[in-house]
Image: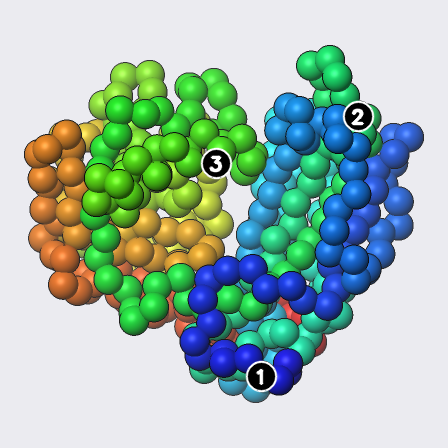
Amino acid sequence: MVKGIDWKNLGFGYTKTDYRYVSNFKDGKWNGGELIQDDLVHISECACVLQYAQTCFEGLKAYRTKENKIVCFRPDLNAERMMASAARLEMPQFPKERFLDAVKQVVKANIDWVPPYGSGASLYIRPFMFGSDAIMGVKPATEYQFRIIVSPVGPYFKGGMKPIVLRIPDFDRAAPLGTGHVKAGLNYAMSLHAIVDAHKQGFNENLYLDSGTRTKIEETGGANIIFVTKDNTVVTPKSNTILPSITRRSLMYVAEHYLGLKVEEREVYLEELSDFKECALCGTAAVLSPVGKINDHGKEILIPSGMEKTGEITQKLYNTLTGIQKGNIEAPKGWIFPIS
């Protein structure tokens, strides 16, 4: 492992590592791809990604297990989701098997950057793709670049999971027939003003409603959301404009098959919020972020689990899923992808 790094006190940010994977698409096909050391991207000033935001990305992690093996968690689903994103944005799909091979190559090449077991840190993996050739008229690019970069990161929340406060904003996250269901850079760009505004008002995140009727819960700017009812049913919103979170899908499986809980994926209405006893955001970075309060235009909705500690079911879900990811709990078949 790289010397001089305080693994237990890493923040969640970018650190330049030794290698990145690059493959270019030109004349209708992807080239063979390679590992390179140059961390700079060289493209035209009129590249489609700069003019029309034609880009998509993914996020996953590599971990060291207690036996010092290095593994990734369900990268096949990241590959499939990126293919779906590319198709929606009129970009060429990077084949699933090549995606998995590229992940393995870049993690192995940066193996000394994978944090030690028990440090609370992991190697964050960021695959992304963008239109790279000069495009002036509004149309898709003809050339693309697929890259994977990695960076060691600490836990998203220092000092453990502390409940956060959400607000329901007047902004919309995604149009009913738009791109809310794909991991496109443009979805995150449009959420930046809303999150900065939320922080200025003293809130941690925005909880978006459906833009069609503004009566149903969707997700936040960067994560899906789950709820726990008073009878311990785990509920997650269903909508065609929600990003299909791999963490959320995994948590719902864990809730049903490991914890023996009832699960529901259904439309969740704003008026239901006061009926839930627990609430949490879910995503790759933090796994679960408990929610203590939701502010609806000045009206505070208090989640019974409170602002002082994580709810019982949320904590069990977190412990079980992270135990699976790090090899301490037996995983369902196909969930763990061995690197070395």
Residue 235 makes an appearance in the image? no
Look at mark 1 in the image and give the residue it sits on: 4
Left or right side of 48 for 58: left
At a point 37% along the width and 43% down the height, the residue shown is: 224
Decide: few, some or many residues near mark 1? Use Cα within 10 Å; few <14, some 14-19, many ≥20. Answer: few
* Tag shown at residue 188: 3
Q: Distance between the residues labelled 3 and 1?
A: 34 Å
Left or right side of 140 for 184: left
**Callout 2: SS:** loop
At a point 62% along the width and 84% down the height, the residue shown is: 3
Q: Which of marks 3 and 2 is in front?
A: 2
Q: How far apart are marks 3 and 2 (CA)?
A: 23 Å
The earlier-in-sequence mark between 1 and 2 is 1
Residue that extends furthest to the right in the rendered view of this protein: 27
Left or right side of 245 for 258: left
Total count of labels: 3
Given the image, on which type of amino acid does mark 2 rest? Ala
Residue that extends furthest to the top in the rendered view of this protein: 137
Q: How far apart are marks 1 and 2 (CA)?
A: 42 Å
The earlier-in-sequence mark between 3 and 2 is 2
Given the image, on which type of amino acid does mark 1 rest? Gly
Look at mark 2 in the image and give the residue it sits on: 134
